[in-house]
């Protein structure tokens, strides 16, 4: 269960600024919560237009989204691409999904493990097609990874993965090479609770991953020289 705080986080999505409520996941961790179904029609137009501008050049044949919050994203992008059909991956078992293709999911916003299900009747819509997978937020990457696995099991070629927001960077490790498929319209950090106040975790900020990668890719000698200079500066202090 979430505990909403009086704090908000300002984020830029597709060039516009939005204020998201910060909610606690535990006594140590909090997130900025995007509820796309509560953001209004204009917001749907904004993200639909922005994602379509990016992915239209890749010529997807069909769009796949995950229930529940990925559904409006899939609809808005499909509409703008001029694609009538789209495929929704379900999370709750229904009578017509008894023999569905299944992949496990662990979401940052859900306390219990979930499953992602692909109706076997939708396989014919995906087999051999160029597919764009979309969702609202990519946080741990578990939902997106499960969606990608299901779509590939259906015999599709995934040409991109779009999201309104990425959150932190753990999703990069989970997705591996598939992280290169991802394009988002904005980024949010995760938050540490310090003395009752939600404080952005620097390691989850937008540029943190780029800085870490730059350090990893530097020659060992250059890293040592950099550390040596830093140690001399400390000694002067």
Image (cartoon, rainbow, N blue to C red):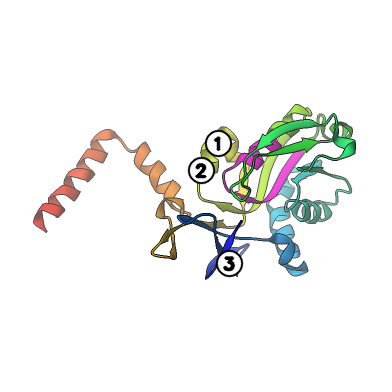
Occupied quadrant, residue 96? top right
Q: Using the image, determine if residue 8 lies above or below residue 2.
A: below
Q: CA distance from mark 2 to mark 1?
A: 7 Å
Occupied quadrant, residue 46? bottom right
Q: Badge 1 is on which residue?
A: 174
Q: Secondary structure at mark 3?
A: strand
Q: Badge 3 is on which residue?
A: 21
**Residue at the (66%, 42%) spot, across then down:** 143
Task: Please report contact status of discs 1 and 3: CB closer than 8 Å, yes or no.
Answer: no
Task: From the image, state whether disc 1 or disc 3 is nearer to you.
Answer: 3
On the rendered structure, is 147 left or right of 196?
right
Q: Badge 2 is on which residue?
A: 170
**Residue at the (61%, 62%) spot, across then down:** 13
Task: Please report contact status of discs 2 and 1: CB closer than 8 Å, yes or no.
Answer: yes
Span colored in magenta: 131-148
**Residue at the (68%, 41%) spot, across then down:** 160
Q: CA distance from mark 1 to mark 3?
A: 27 Å
């Amino acid at each position: 269960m979430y505990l909403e705080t009086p704090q908000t986080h300002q984020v830029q999505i597709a060039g516009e600024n939005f204020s998201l409520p910060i909610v606690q996941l535990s006594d140590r961790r909090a997130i900025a919560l995007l509820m796309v179904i509560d953001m209004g029609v204009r917001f749907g137009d904004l993200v639909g237009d922005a994602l379509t501008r990016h992915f239209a050049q890749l010529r997807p044949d069909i769009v796949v989204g995950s229930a529940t919050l990925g559904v409006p994203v899939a609809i808005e992008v499909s509409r703008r691409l001029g694609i009538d059909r789209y495929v929704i991956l379900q999370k709750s078992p229904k009578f017509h999904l008894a023999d569905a293709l299944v992949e496990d999911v662990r979401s940052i916003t859900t306390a219990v493990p979930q499953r992602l299900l692909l109706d076997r009747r939708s396989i014919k819509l995906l087999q051999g097609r160029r597919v764009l997978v979309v969702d609202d937020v990519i946080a741990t990457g578990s939902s997106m990874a499960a969606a990608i696995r299901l779509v590939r099991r259906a015999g599709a070629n995934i040409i991109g993965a779009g999201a309104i927001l990425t959150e932190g960077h753990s999703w990069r490790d989970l997705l591996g090479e598939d992280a290169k498929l991802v394009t988002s319209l904005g980024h949010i950090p995760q938050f540490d609770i310090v003395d009752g106040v939600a404080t952005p975790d620097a390691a989850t900020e937008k540029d943190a991953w780029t800085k870490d990668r730059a350090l990893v890719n530097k020659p060992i000698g250059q890293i040592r020289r950099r550390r040596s200079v830093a140690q001399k500066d400390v000694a002067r202090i």
